[in-house]
Amino acid sequence: MMSYKEMMAGVQLAGVALVLGWLGWDAANGGLVDASAASVAVKMLWAVGGLVVFNIVGAILATIVISIIQRSEFKDEPSDERDASISARSQRNSGFATSIAAALLLIPLAMGADVTLAVYGLFFAPLLGGTVNAISELIYYRIG
């Protein structure tokens, strides 16, 4: 059976997949051609807003659906030492991923790459960190 924390991680990963799909579709349809930093920033703001809304609505809908299937209220369990340990390890992994992605982004910028790359990096480095956090939680909850 899936715990509430695992369900939340799954909702987060589904949101990331949808946003990456939308951004990929946008790029494939000319979204990167002559894009200014301002227009890219607006796109990234929409993506962040979409992720926030998706996570809220997705968590509510998933909780309702799982409650109906289980025929009992599906809610978050009280945290224990295991949850604290999993959260700490997942956040550590997330921090590493975000830091490495941000540091790697500085290389092309230092070599004179277009500043638009920085806007994408400001979005993708934390997105990568959040994705690593969610995947880490799912793995740690499954392997103990």
Image (cartoon, rainbow, N blue to C red):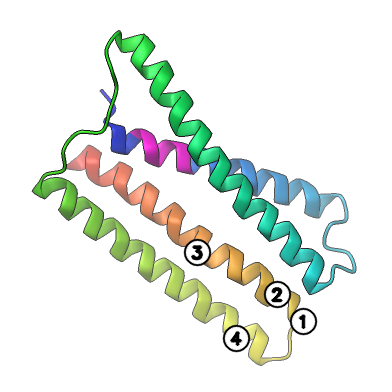
Considering only vertical position in the picture, is 142 above or below 66? below
Quarter holding residue 36: bottom right
Q: CA distance from mark 3 to mark 4?
A: 17 Å
Which quarter of the image is occupied by the N terminus? Answer: top left
- Label 3 CA crowd tier, 10 Å (few <14, some 14–19, many 20+): some
Considering only vertical position in the picture, is 108 above or below 89? below
Residue 79: image location, x then y, percent: 16, 43
- Label 2 CA crowd tier, 10 Å (few <14, some 14–19, many 20+): some
Considering only vertical position in the picture, is 23 above or below 15? below
Label 2 belongs to which residue? 117
Q: CA distance from mark 3 to mark 2?
A: 15 Å
Circles 3, 2 touching at the beta carbon (< 8 Å): no
Circles 2, 1 touching at the beta carbon (< 8 Å): yes
Quarter holding residue 138: top left
Per the image, label 2 sits on a secondary structure element best described as helix
Considering only vertical position in the picture, is 134 above or below 104? above
Residue 21: image location, x then y, percent: 67, 44
The boundaries of the magenta stretch are 7-12
User: Sequence-wise, which precedes: disc 3 or disc 4?
Assistant: 4
Q: Is residue 10 magenta?
A: yes
Per the image, label 3 sits on a secondary structure element best described as helix
Q: CA distance from mark 1 to mark 4?
A: 12 Å
Identity, as a three-letter code, of the amino acid under mark 1: Asp
Which residue appears at 74% of the width and 57% of the height? 43
Q: CA distance from mark 1 to mark 3?
A: 20 Å
- The rendered magenta stretch, by its main secondary structure, is classed as helix
Identity, as a three-letter code, of the amino acid under mark 2: Leu
Label 4 belongs to which residue? 107
Label 1 belongs to which residue? 114
User: Sequence-wise, which precedes: disc 1 or disc 4?
Assistant: 4
Judge whether residue 16 can be spotted in this image. Answer: no
